[in-house]
Amino acid sequence: VTFELNPQLEADTFLVRDWPFCRVLLMNDTSFAWLILVPREVGLRDFHDVAPKDETNFLGEINQAARRLKVMTGADKMNVAALGNMVPQLHIHIIARFESDAAWPGPVWGAFPAIPYEDQVAKDFIEAFNGFEN
Amino acid sequence: VTFELNPQLEADTFLVRDWPFCRVLLMNDTSFAWLILVPREVGLRDFHDVAPKDETNFLGEINQAARRLKVMTGADKMNVAALGNMVPQLHIHIIARFESDAAWPGPVWGAFPAIPYEDQVAKDFIEAFNGFEN
């Protein structure tokens, strides 16, 4: 059985890149700088389902994504969360938060309808993320 | 400088125990089986602030808490999240979610006012958690 991205995640995001353990996605919502990491393993659902052999990559990729996004955006706070109440495939939200953002200090999920990117803006964001050295 | 628990976390929780890296707290809200893990290090704010030397303990303790809580409660899904928009001290929410719970499938934060435990019920919960072998 090979990895397939959940159709809802596919519909809601742009592909950023594949890292050794996770697929990196950009949420198609200009309201927040919002990445989603999806382990490319079949059958993972909860955060604690990641196998011990994969934990170093898993945590390393979460931290790398959060650090890049924080430096790129100058965020006040990073939100990191594995919820999965709606989409069962394990996925980790990494969201740059600002004291000035529309949902602050509440959570972003369900706060507002997504405002989609113009394609070029999403491409520029992805290029900046992928070109980032740190 | 020694570790001190943030006063808001102190006010909102019961002490469950100290693990090697984190303090384990029970959120004083009977609406959800809800633990909070607080690394006992000074100055941590974001999830990615945990030092590489502590990552194994950090992830291991999150997973251990989530597994115990899932087995104890029979939860449909575990939510794991580091938000910290209101309380700056790094803390990880670990929440047992049910398709039948009041906030499902939305997030629990800010959904409802907390309904405090009766002391004995909280004590029983903590004893069960601490006595759990897995």
Image: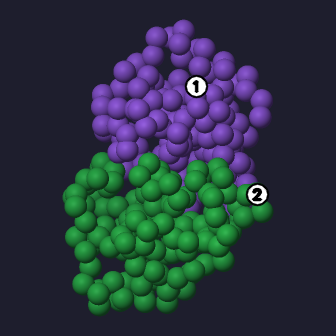
Chain colours: A green, B purple
Q: Position of residue A42 (x, y in %)?
A: 64, 64
Secondary-structure class at tag 1: strand
User: Is A1 placed left or right of A131 in the picture?
Assistant: right
Among the 4 quarters of the image, the one containing residue B18: top right
- For marks 1 and 2, give the CA distance: 28 Å
In this rendered view, identify the residue nearer to me: A31 or A68.
Answer: A31
Label annotation for residue B97: none
Q: Position of residue A43 (x, y in %)?
A: 63, 59
Would you name the residue on which mark 2 appears?
Answer: A52
Viewer-closest of A69 and A50: A50
Q: How many marks?
A: 2
Marks 1 and 2: CB-CB under 8 Å? no
Whether labels 1 and 2 share one chain:
no
Whether residue B2 is visible: no
Camera-nearest label, 1 or 2: 2
- What residue sits right under mark 1 in the picture? B15
Check disc 2 and report its element: helix, strand or loop.
helix
Q: Is residue B128 above or below residue A102?
A: above
